[in-house]
Image (cartoon, helix red, strand yellow):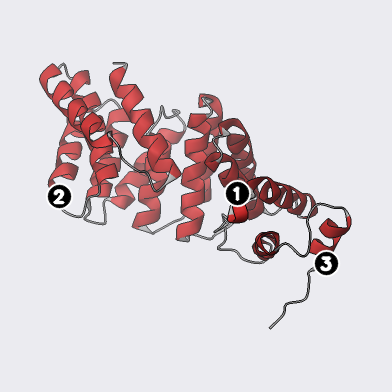
Amino acid sequence: MKFPIPFFLIVLSLTGCVSIDNKPELAIEKEVSQFINNSNAYELKNPNVGNNSNKTELLLTRAIRLNPSNPRLISARAKLYADQNRPKLAARDYFSFSELDLESDVESHEATIAWMDGAAAQVLAEDLSSYQSYCLNMLRRFEGTQDTIVAERVAKSVLFQKTSKEALPMAKKMADLAMKNDWPHARFVKGLANYRAGNFKAASNYAEECLSLPKRNVFLDIQANLLLAMASNAQGDSANYKASLSKAKSQMENIKYYWFHNKVICQSLLFQAEKQ
């Protein structure tokens, strides 16, 4: 079945932005156009089809101009910038996304991952103020959730870097909600919450609990070991600090990150641990 050419694509073709005979561009344009009515789409599945990321950026930018209040389009372009290692542009777009998506009640996997990537982008752009403001938006966006997985993702995003005084109590509530699910990820965010609150012994205990439970992945192990290193150092335990830091660094050697936010969280925690 042949699909009719959307008006959006005809306009781009007439302006010379895209050729209607180019199949990769057609595929990208079709996916971009579907973002408008797809509440679960927060990033493009194949943004570099045909090795044409520049054209993808152009299509997304034009689509945003036509639909400036659509947060998912902005999130998609932000992720494209993040994948292109353009952190300041990614951070800018993700911050705009955080303001436009505030009233949404979507708690899908795609939505929460987009918000996590946005927090990571603020840190990668080395803008602590924007990160903390973004985190407040994230906490307000998901404050009514009863989903323990959503709560864990929000807590991790808000707590992996220096947390503002306003955000900390809200982040601790998210960590408490995550703890209703008996899994290692919840122990990690509970430990992070205690570390940011200055409860270093409790942070160490939760990090150790996390590392003792099944159903972990290597990224969680890295993060928990780095948390344990920081908490141990804060208590003056240099031996455990060095041992935990060494484990984390060994685990990070030649690792392939499947999620943008996981890479940033691991690298950020490593930086914080090493500068102590």
Please name whichever residue, 55 or 79, is drawn nearer the observer in this view of the structure: 55
**What residue appears at the point 65 percent right and 41 percent down from the top-left corner?**
96
Q: Residues within 10 Å of mark 3 (few under 14, many from 20)?
A: few
- Callout 1: SS: helix
Q: Alpha-carbon distance for marks 2 and 3? A: 54 Å
Please name whichever residue, 240 or 133, is drawn nearer the observer in this view of the structure: 240
Kind of residue at badge 1:
Ser
Q: Alpha-carbon distance for marks 2 and 1? A: 34 Å
Q: Earlier in the sequence, mark 2 or mark 1?
A: 1
x, y (%) of residue 132?
50, 31
Residue 7 visible? yes
Residue 169 visible? no
Taking the image as shown, residue 43 lies to the left or right of residue 193, namely right
Please name whichever residue, 85 or 97, is drawn nearer the observer in this view of the structure: 85
The residue wearing badge 3 is 7
From this view, report whether residue 133 is shown above or below residue 49: above
Q: Residue furthest right?
A: 14
- Callout 3: SS: helix
**What residue appears at the point 20 percent right and 30 percent down from the top-left corner?**
228
Residue 213 circle label: 2
Kind of residue at badge 2:
Leu
The residue wearing badge 1 is 75
Nearer the observer: mark 1 or 3; the answer is 3
Q: Residues within 10 Å of mark 2 (few under 14, many from 20)?
A: few
Residue 46 circle label: none
**What residue appears at the point 26 percent right and 55 percent down from the top-left corner?**
180
Q: Quadrant of the C terminus?
A: top left
From this view, report whether residue 45 is shown above or below residue 251: below
x, y (%) of residue 269?
33, 29
x, y (%) of residue 64?
73, 50
Taking the image as shown, residue 56 lies to the left or right of residue 107, namely right
